Amino acid sequence: MQNKNDVKLHPKLTLQLFTSEKCFGPGVALILEKVKEHSSLRSAASEINMSYSKAWTIVKRAQKHLGFDLLVSKTGGADGGGATLTKEGERLLSEFRQCEKELNEICALKYEEHFSFIKDISKLE
Amino acid sequence: MQNKNDVKLHPKLTLQLFTSEKCFGPGVALILEKVKEHSSLRSAASEINMSYSKAWTIVKRAQKHLGFDLLVSKTGGADGGGATLTKEGERLLSEFRQCEKELNEICALKYEEHFSFIKDISKLE
């Protein structure tokens, strides 16, 4: 009870898509965004401090469970001359971020509805 | 693309409450539910294959960041004669589960809206 918190209590919502296991979530979405930015999976992975092989494993697993490709390599394999998003990858990324946004807006309202009692009872200043 | 999945693609939403760090989520909620069931933090931890000390650390961290107690020990300390939820702990648990439920209902609708295109393009059977 002693500690003052700099950051006010707030909700965090995480959206993931599962089959029998996780196949798409904020991590893969971030990789795809960085691939769009850099036109390269290697540069994308590097920017988020992830090994190339880990990033590629995550993307491959997502592709396998979704049943379609997210990335297409431009020349000489995924490790070669760069990568871009497939049309389906672009669509999925865009729908995922839009869905997250809409859910977060609703979550902000639900948070007020359900958790505003906390500020009346919390002993934190 | 080869693998058939037994489980259909579906969304999973995780609600957590943060200050500067995570302070409440499905894990603490489950501990509280099991404490209610067993009137003991030790039995609660044991049922979910968690060490007593880990469960107590999680509950203590949540209490510190929320600014109120979630558990009250019945006799002789938290490790002693059992534990029950405080009135505030009961309220938080109940609001958290209700909020999760409402968000999951909305998420099911949003999922259809944003991700139904996947079944048209997925090569999985």
Image: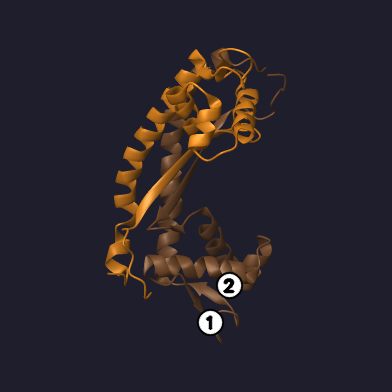
Chain colours: A brown, B orange
Q: Quadrant of the C terminus of chain A?
A: top right
- Could you tell me the amino acid type at mark 2? Ser
User: Would residue B16 be seen by someone viewing this image from the given angle?
Assistant: no
Mark number, residue B1 = none
Q: Which residue is mark 2?
A: A39
- The CA distance from mark 1 to mark 2 is 9 Å
For label 2, count other residues whose C-alpha is less than 10 Å away and answer few (under 14), some (14-19) or many (20+).
Answer: some
On screen, residue A79 above or below A19: below
Residue shown at 52%/60% (left/top)? A28
Mark number, residue A74 = 1
On screen, residue A45 above or below A10: below
Residue shown at 53%/64% (left/top)? A32
> Which percent across, then down, holds residue A103?
42, 41
Determine the chain carrying the residue at label 2: A
Q: Are marks 1 and 2 on the same chain?
A: yes
For label 1, count other residues whose C-alpha is less than 10 Å away and answer few (under 14), some (14-19) or many (20+).
Answer: some
> Which percent across, then down, holds residue B123?
31, 72
> Which percent across, then down, holds residue A26?
52, 53
Q: Element type at marker 1?
A: loop
Residue B60, by quadrant, is top right
> Which percent across, then down, holds residue B25?
51, 35
Residue shown at 71%/22% (left/top)? A4
Q: Element type at marker 2?
A: loop
Q: Quadrant of the N terminus of chain A?
A: top right
Q: How many marks?
A: 2
Of A3 and A34, nearer the camera is: A3
Mark 1 or 2, nearer chain start: 2
- Could you tell me the amino acid type at mark 1? Lys
Determine the chain carrying the residue at label 1: A
Question: CB of mark 1 within 8 Å of CB of mark 2?
Answer: yes
User: Would residue A100 be seen by someone viewing this image from the given angle?
Assistant: yes
